[in-house]
Image (tube, grey):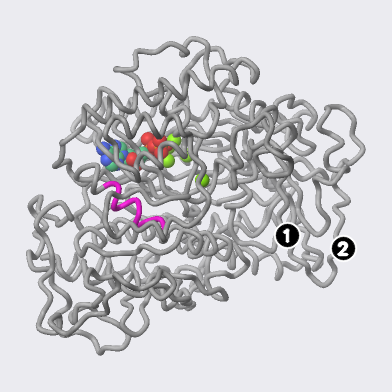
């Protein structure tokens, strides 16, 4: 989550009247940052991950797995552990991880402590770093508690049995959410979180309403009307909403922020050479986000039922959807300013690079902007694309304001800017430099679901890092209409999407529309030498290529052949529907995302052993895309439906859930084989 300033949160009516104030000063703060960083370049290529955990408490005698609500105690303890480690090993303090609070009281977040470089030798140590963080957390929990990297706890919000430890009071004790299913004990009590929850509900004018299609098994009633919803409760004003239509038949209904913000993900943040490079990287990652969501899908069950989706995205989008009925287009605009097509948590709406390849035709969905903000930014000399992006973020109201933080020194603070920015949760985030810090322009990749093991989490992190290197090094063009990226977001969440869906993607990704002959494509036999970039990046120096340097690959003889002149093609002709296998592993002249990563890796002057180490991670991506390996969602779903106690009625019972989480923990510890998920090589490496 964003900043956690301490203070007294304002009520929604008090917050609402300060919206213009926050917008105005937020932009002033951004402009100070812009001016301070204008013309600066040459920042090192740094990156780091964020991993979120669910702390599960196992009660073997009851065959119950529940959510341990001890985040505050655990973080206090981990803070001391980290301090001790720093004192004991000052020379190693750079690698000592940090742990952060999260929305759910059962969640933890960890980051590596300091960002690493993009060299292959840095990448090789990622898994060990992730494992160290997990081990550190695990060894400071109670004996029956486990920090698990599952995206969604399958029984969060069930009403038949307790799902928290300690058993969470009455579920009717949350004035902020007014949820029928989760009490206030599941939410971090730091003022920011209940205030966010309550103000989203107040702003929207009702509770959030999330409806995920249920997976209809042979014994699932049809239509499915959930018998476990307390439709007739009368404790809070929002209690009648479920009965009055908010809960849809044939769906799993959820009514609180915790259902979304209580999910875990894997995020990667990259620092760019300069602001222009950050903007190009952002744009290139926009079409990649849904692909990686499908490939990392890990959430097939919600609130005790199997869902007909495999991923969390729409749940989390719905869980913080603060738009009023007018903004959602259900009523004519009268009190509100904008029709807003999406939740504040959703996919990107516009590309932002100042690049001739970023054509108007690609920005083809409604993207309302705050006109005053746009004019101010333009007046300050900021170009259209970036002004548009920020003016779009600034259509949102601030959701939490602390009374102590209303007046700020705009030259010295980014709090008002971050207030809006950090509650625009999109697939990709463009992060300006924080004040008083050497941290520069960054881009965050946010769509991935967290994976069950650190082997997988490392593999996806490494893949994305290398993909960004390939994008910059080869100046790749991934532009395609945003409407098709959004269509991919919808497809990415479907059950078994990585296997059964096709996805839109750009056919011609190399600059001249021509795949260099040395890049391995499926249509070609293995290239003898592998692809080499002309300035053959050295692994020892700082010469890892990025677009801002002079790196460009020299096209060989074949480049003099006429290339498809992509510039006059309609966007439709540039894009094709591909299977996940084709998209990652290539098809015809299309090298696949892994193809460009391989070309980049082959261009590096690195020892074979290091390349082999990297290969084992890239193989996971390759095989998951080809279908040889399954996604965690598929693995979890299969575990549930083949469990002896499963009644083919979509219900994930307490004991199925317990066995599932035990099994996942065993896989993570390497004591249970899951070759269909991790590959045979993984199991062998675990045993040695
Ligand atoms: P947030 O929650 O705001 O997204 P976090 O601080 O939790 O961000 O995590 C940011 C990640 O970015 C961490 O993994 C960290 O290592 C990494 N990081 C920190 N500084 C830089 C930097 N200058 N460049 C790139 N990555 C960085
Ligand atoms: Mg987080
Ligand atoms: Mg974080
Ligand atoms: Mg954050
Ligand atoms: Mg983050
Ligand atoms: Mg949006």
The one of 631 and 138 positioned closer to us in this rendering:
631
In the displayed orientation, state which residue is furthest to the right: 232
Q: Residue at x 58, y 40 (%)?
A: 261
- Where's the C terminus, which quadrant? bottom left
Report the residue marked by disc 2.
Answer: 223
Mark closest to the chain's N terminus, 1 or 2: 1
Q: Secondary structure at mark 2?
A: loop
- Res 103 quadrant in image: top right
Q: Report, in whole angstroms, how far the alpha carbon at label 1 lies from the one at label 2.
A: 12 Å
Q: Secondary structure at mark 1?
A: strand
What secondary structure do most residues of the magenta stretch adopt? helix
Question: Residue 238 location in percent, x, y?
Answer: 81, 32
* Numbered circle sitting on residue 236: none
- Res 37 quadrant in image: top left
Report the residue marked by disc 1.
Answer: 213
* Residue neighbourhood size for the residue with mark 2, other residues' Cα within 10 Å, grouped as few (<14), some (14–19), many (≥20): few
The one of 129 and 159 positioned closer to us in this rendering:
159
Question: Residue 554 location in percent, x, y?
Answer: 10, 72
The reply to whether the magenta stretch includes residue 279 is yes
* Residue neighbourhood size for the residue with mark 1, other residues' Cα within 10 Å, grouped as few (<14), some (14–19), many (≥20): some
Residue 591 as seen in the image, left or right of residue 300: left
The reply to whether the magenta stretch includes residue 291 is no
The one of 502 and 36 positioned closer to us in this rendering:
36
Q: Residue at x 20, y 65 (%)?
A: 474
Q: Bounds of the magenta span?
A: 278-286
Q: Residue at x 9, y 65 (%)?
A: 536
Q: Is residue 588 above or below residue 604?
A: below
Q: Residue at x 57, y 76 (%)?
A: 500
């Amino acid at each position: 989550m964003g900043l956690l300033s301490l203070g007294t949160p304002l009520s929604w009516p008090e917050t609402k009247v300060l919206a213009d104030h926050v917008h105005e000063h937020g932009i002033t703060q951004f402009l100070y940052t812009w001016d301070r960083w204008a013309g600066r370049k040459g920042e090192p290529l740094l990156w780091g991950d964020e991993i979120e955990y669910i702390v599960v408490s196992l009660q073997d005698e009851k065959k119950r797995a529940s959510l341990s609500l001890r985040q505050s105690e655990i973080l206090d303890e981990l803070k001391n552990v980290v301090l001790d480690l720093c004192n004991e090993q000052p020379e190693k303090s750079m690698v000592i991880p940090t742990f952060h609070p999260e929305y759910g009281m059962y969640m933890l977040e960890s980051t590596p402590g300091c960002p690493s470089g993009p060299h292959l030798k840095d990448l090789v140590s990622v898994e060990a770093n992730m494992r160290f963080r997990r081990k550190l957390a695990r060894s400071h929990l109670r004996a029956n508690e486990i920090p698990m990297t599952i995206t969604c706890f399958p029984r969060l919000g069930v009403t038949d049995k307790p799902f928290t430890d300690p058993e969470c009071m009455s579920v009717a004790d949350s004035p902020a959410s007014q949820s029928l299913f989760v009490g206030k004990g599941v939410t971090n009590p730091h003022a920011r979180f209940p205030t966010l929850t309550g103000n989203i509900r107040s702003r929207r004018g009702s509770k959030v309403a999330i409806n995920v299609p249920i997976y209809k098994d042979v014994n699932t009633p049809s239509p499915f009307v959930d018998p476990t919803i307390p439709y007739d409760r009368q404790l809070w004003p929002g209690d009648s909403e479920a009965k009055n239509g908010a809960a849809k038949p044939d769906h799993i209904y959820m009514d609180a922020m915790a259902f979304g913000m209580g999910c875990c993900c894997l995020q990667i943040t990259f620092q760019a050479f300069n602001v222009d490079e950050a903007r190009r990287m952002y744009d290139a990652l926009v079409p990649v986000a849904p692909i990686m969501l499908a490939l990392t899908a890990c959430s097939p069950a919600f609130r005790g039922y199997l869902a007909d989706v495999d991923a969390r995205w729409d749940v989390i989008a719905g869980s913080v959807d603060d738009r009023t009925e007018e903004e959602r287009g259900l009523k004519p605009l009268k009190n509100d300013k904008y029709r807003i097509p999406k939740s504040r948590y959703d996919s990107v709406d516009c590309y932002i690079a100042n690049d001739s390849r970023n054509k108007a035709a690609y920005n083809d969905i409604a993207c309302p902007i705050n006109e005053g903000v746009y004019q101010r930014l333009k007046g300050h000399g900021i170009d259209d694309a970036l002004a548009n992006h920020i003016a779009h973020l600034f259509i949102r109201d601030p959701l939490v304001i602390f009374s102590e933080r209303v007046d700020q020194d705009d030259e010295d603070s980014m709090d008002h800017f971050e207030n809006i920015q950090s509650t625009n949760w999109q697939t990709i985030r463009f992060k300006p430099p924080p004040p008083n810090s050497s941290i520069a322009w960054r881009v965050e990749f946010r769509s991935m679901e967290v994976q069950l093991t650190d082997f997988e989490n490392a593999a996806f992190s490494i893949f994305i890092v290398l993909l960004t290197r390939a994008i910059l090094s080869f100046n790749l063009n991934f532009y395609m209409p945003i409407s098709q990226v959004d269509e991919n977001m919808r497809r990415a969440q479907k059950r078994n999407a990585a296997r059964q869906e096709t996805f839109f993607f750009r056919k011609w990704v190399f600059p001249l529309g021509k795949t260099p002959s040395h890049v391995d494509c499926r249509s070609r036999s293995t290239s003898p030498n592998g692809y080499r970039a002309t300035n053959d990046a050295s692994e020892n120096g700082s010469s890892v290529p990025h677009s801002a340097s002079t790196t460009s690959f020299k096209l060989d003889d074949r480049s003099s052949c006429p290339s498809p002149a992509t510039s006059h093609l309609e966007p439709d002709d540039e894009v094709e529907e591909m299977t996940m296998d084709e998209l990652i592993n290539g098809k015809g002249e299309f090298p696949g995302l892994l193809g460009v990563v391989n070309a980049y890796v082959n261009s590096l002057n690195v020892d074979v052993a290091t390349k082999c180490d990297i290969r084992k991670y890239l193989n996971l991506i390759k095989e998951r895309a080809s279908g040889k390996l399954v996604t965690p969602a598929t693995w979890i779903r299969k575990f549930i439906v083949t469990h002896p106690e499963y009644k083919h009625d979509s219900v994930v019972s307490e004991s199925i859930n317990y066995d599932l989480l035990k099994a996942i923990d065993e896989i993570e510890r390497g004591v249970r084989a899951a070759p269909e998920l991790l590959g045979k090589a993984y199991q062998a490496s675990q045993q040695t």
